[in-house]
Image: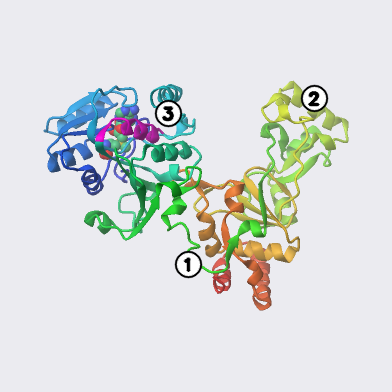
Amino acid sequence: MKTREDKPKNRYSQFFTDPLIADFMVNEVRHEGAGTFLDPAVGRGAFTCAAHRSMDVSISACEIDPSMVRNFCLSNDYDADLVCDDYLLHIYKERFDCIVCNPPYNRFQDIENRKKYRDLFKERYAVNMSGYSNLCVYFLIKSMNELSESGRCCYIIPYEFLNTGYGEVIKEYLLRSGMLEKIIKFDFRSKIFGDAITTSCILVLENRPHDKVDLITVKDVSELKKGRFENVRTYDYGDLKPEEKWLSYFGDNKKADGLKNIVKLSDFGKVSRGIATGANDFFLLSRSDIEERGLSREACVLCLTRSPDVKDAVVTGGTMQDLIDANKKVFVFDGTLAVNQEDLDYIEYGEKRGYNKKYLTGKRSPWYSIEHRETAPILITVFNRNEIKIIRNEAGVKNLTAFHGIYLKDKDAAFADIFFCYLITPLARELLYGSRREYGEGLYMFEPGDLTGADMLDLNLISDDDRNDILDIYDMIKKENSIQKADELDRIFRKYV
Ligand SMILES: C[S@@+](CC[C@H](N)C(=O)[O-])C[C@H]1O[C@@H](n2cnc3c(N)ncnc32)[C@H](O)[C@@H]1O
């Protein structure tokens, strides 16, 4: 796995597995009668070395990078049938009793042969891989097809596939094969193996039909050393749905377990994505853009466009004025509101530049209109690294797709303030995180449906006294424009769970 010392050479995603984890994984595939062992992405040979030490098997390995092959040959003195090739294209005629792999983790944008692999997998394995698939899952599927009867396979890969869209095909494939025995997800308190391991999981498969799967959360290295796990959830195959987010099946993400008075966010309102212009270069304008072109203010609608621009937790008219003064692009041109010749000229300019023929604008009528959407009292950022950003939209401005809008059934402004105060607490974040989609390296996102279906405290239960305290704190948050008081709010809301 990636460690601080091992700087990845990104083209081939060269992160190396810690010996403790390599030993554990090799141990998972060891079984009676096993005679052959394959590492499809061998690198320096962490797994082959562990297998050589602990098993009596003939070792095969594949590695795409010739310099890594040389490195392997110099540092390993046991016999291994090593091929220097692209594993995904290499044809193995035999089947293997044991396969262990830490495959390359290239994101879909960085996969050079993406189309070729997808076509190949459709033809060879009858699987329609999503175009967004990480390279590692191609390795996994190929290896599953190279296991001998009762052969065992162990992979370490990012666990993002458990919750993201491209993972649905993979989960479906795993279930259909019947091979999945367990998934071990790391939730280490310490960063002993570097950052990558904190978002990884180990899959253990065996080529015979299974009817149950263990989903395991490992919190401490000692559990790996002992091979005994404290947090195990066993599921029938039929209970695991490919279209669902499996991270929540592990239990640890179901933070609502054991809490009382938990309802769904949908009980209070709904979440919708922001406005998609389809051509931000044309539609987004700063004050100087408007002045230079002589556009009318009527046709230029104030809008929150980019998440990094918004530093305030409570967005007021003052916040918007600061953004205008900083010449941020916080206006969206709506040609249907045109009132002067310059507005019309701008529409014509857009047509000359072909902005009317973009994917979204080409479908809109007229192309220069902007989706009509109510302004949302609360906004939440779609893509997040570390903390999610929650915004109380007191300015009543529209928002683009960088934010989702939370539309409350109760239109009272004071209720929106309380709802916002709840959302910024650690309690609310813990519950929301159970619904996030992970993209690896700390990046995660929410689809509107993820948030609408998220667990939350039933805010109807808040007493009048607590309501007043919360609203007093809200006033302070607004005055200081900082969510420093979130812990104080947390103490109030936690009394109810
Ligand atoms: C994450 S590293 C793991 C290395 C080693 N097995 C370990 O666990 O320490 C992945 C290795 O796969 C190699 N690799 C990348 N793409 C490959 C491909 N298409 N076929 C075979 N090997 C590949 C990389 O060069 C790298 O050495």
Label 2 Cα crowd, 10 Å radius (few <14 / some 14-19 / many 20+): some
Query: At which x and y percent is residue 375?
Result: 74, 50
Which numbered disc flags the more N-terminal residue, 1 or 3? Answer: 3
Query: At which x and y percent is residue 27?
Result: 21, 46
Q: Identify the disc placed on residue 426.
A: none
Which residue is depicted at the point 25% across and 22% down? 93
Q: Nearer the viewer, residue 424 or 33?
A: 33
Quadrant in which residue 116 is drawn: top left
Front disc: 2 or 3: 3
Which residue is depicted at the point 49% across and 33% down? 132
Q: Are marks 2 and 1 in contact (CB under 8 Å)?
A: no
Question: Colour mode?
Answer: rainbow
Q: Nearer the viewer, residue 170 or 240?
A: 240
Q: Identify the disc placed on residue 258.
A: 1
In the image, the segment drawn in magenta is 135-149
Q: Nearer the viewer, residue 94 or 178?
A: 178
Q: What kind of residue is marked 1?
A: Gly
Query: SS for tag 1?
Result: loop
Which numbered disc flags the more N-terminal residue, 2 or 1? Answer: 1
Quadrant in which residue 153 is drawn: top left
Residue linked to disc 3: 111
Q: Identify the disc placed on residue 348.
A: 2
Query: At which x and y percent is residue 117?
Result: 41, 24
Front disc: 1 or 3: 1
